[in-house]
Amino acid sequence: MRDRAWIWSVMVLTEEENGDAEIPSYRLQVKFQQNLGTEIEGNDTPGTATPLVGSDVFIYGNHATLTDSDYYAITLPAPGGSLRAEIIEGVSKTCESNDMDSEITLYDANLQLVADDDDDGRGFCSRIDGTGAQVQQDTQASNLPAGTYFILVKSHNTLNLTRNIFDYRLVVRYERPDIYLKDDFDNDLGKWSAVSADGGDLWLNPEAGLGGVKGLEAVVDDTNPLFVEDDRPMDDGRYRVDFLLDPFDFDPGMAQGHQRARIFIAFEEAPTRRLVAVVLKRQGAQYSLMSRVRRDDGTLADTGFFNIGPGTHRVECEWKRATSPSSADGEFRMWIDEDLVSESTNLQIYTSSVDFARLGAMSLKAGTSGRLRFDDFESRRYTYIGYWYGEPSGAVREGTER
């Protein structure tokens, strides 16, 4: 196909690399990039660089003379992002023919060298790759500060006329950090974007350390919400969260007929809209958990309640947006104590995306009281966190996505 470029991402481990254990399956991921057209000539300096907008894009360029220099500019909106920039064939020549001998260089906004490559691509084509959940080819291009970066495309040398005059496509992928937030609550709440503590009712208590030295304890004595908030998600179509919960002696107000409170919510902003909520229920001495997902039409898809016993429990959820407005292929999964308790793969959830999330005691009713305890919070963009379909952390599964 001439109007699109491909990136093939394959995680293949040998048995030796996997501790001599058999690899049961492999995962192949194919991405389509957006066509940005052609370079804007006169882009032979950083000041006249052709802009690249988007995270999976490609643009046509023409290296018409031996000394031609083509600059491109891309802006990373958030810290911690990674870049992959690769030269592939344009129209007349191919990398495998060894008739394209390119060089690609990545500079920061101050024109300080970040990474450079000659032949890491196919044939004599070039590639800089700082992406990947586990292994990066060019670590200098990973975990980058936010800001503008320049990509320079030129000939590797000016002696071979055949190899150094060519048309090409520059394929660029910007990958934001997988992990949004990881907090064991052992030190302070400085990692969180906001804290609603109601005068000290939300605090780090050594007795609440479910997985470490301390834990987050919500002391509920009125209906004011108690939560920590993370705003690292940014218009994201996929969100995973994992945390430890101990309901302890929490009472949602049973004497007044109230049985439920929300302990986790993922939101869209502008306007604020709840997309996912984890609900804690108490009926007598029995606690249970449920998740609720909002569809595009405003209706709610509930998982139903799952009973939990006294003590500590691990809760994990995954929300994934549908692929188009007309396709009901959005997904939601919920795990409790490493067991997949609910899975939906036919949800119409396309119009919204995750922008921030809260953990704590929320949507409280009159008569509520007691304590809730949390620990070992982690949220990610796409890779699994703890257990995935009952398989232990470290298994070669979706966590190897690139």
Image (cartoon, rainbow, N blue to C red):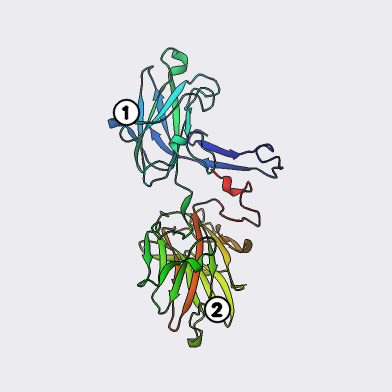
Residue at which label 1 appears: 43
- Residue type at numbered disc 2: Arg
Q: Give the side of residue 325 with respect to residue 396, left or right.
A: left
- Whether residue 82 is situated above or below residue 65 in the rendered picture: below
Residue 150 point in image, percent of width and height: 35, 33
For the residue labelled by badge 2, is the local secondary structure a helix, a strand or a loop? strand
Measure the C-alpha gap from mark 1 to mark 2: 65 Å
Q: Give the side of residue 87 with respect to residue 151, left or right.
A: right
Task: Work out whether residue 299 can be spotted.
Answer: no
Residue at coordinates 56% horizontally, 54% vertically from top-left? 385
Task: Work out whether residue 390 can be spotted.
Answer: yes
Residue 151 point in image, percent of width and height: 38, 31
Which of 198/126 is in front? Answer: 198
- Whether residue 204 is situated above or below residue 28 in the rendered picture: below
| The residue positioned farthest toward the left in the image shown | 47
Residue 256 point in image, percent of width and height: 48, 87
The total of numbered circles placed on residues is 2
Residue at coordinates 51% horizontally, 27% vertically from top-left? 120
Q: Residues within 10 Å of mark 2 (few under 14, many from 20)?
A: many
- Whether residue 64 is situated above or below residue 54 in the rendered picture: above
Q: Quadrant of residue 336?
A: bottom right
Q: Quadrant of residue 170?
A: top left
Q: Which mark is residue 110?
A: none
Q: Residues within 10 Å of mark 1 (few under 14, many from 20)?
A: some
Which of 22/244 is in front? Answer: 244
Q: Earlier in the sequence, mark 1 or mark 2?
A: 1
Give the foreground label among 1 and 2.
Answer: 2
Residue 359 point in image, percent of width and height: 45, 65
Residue at which label 2 appears: 282
Residue at coordinates 43% horizontally, 18% vertically from top-left? 165
For the residue labelled by badge 1, is the local secondary structure a helix, a strand or a loop? loop
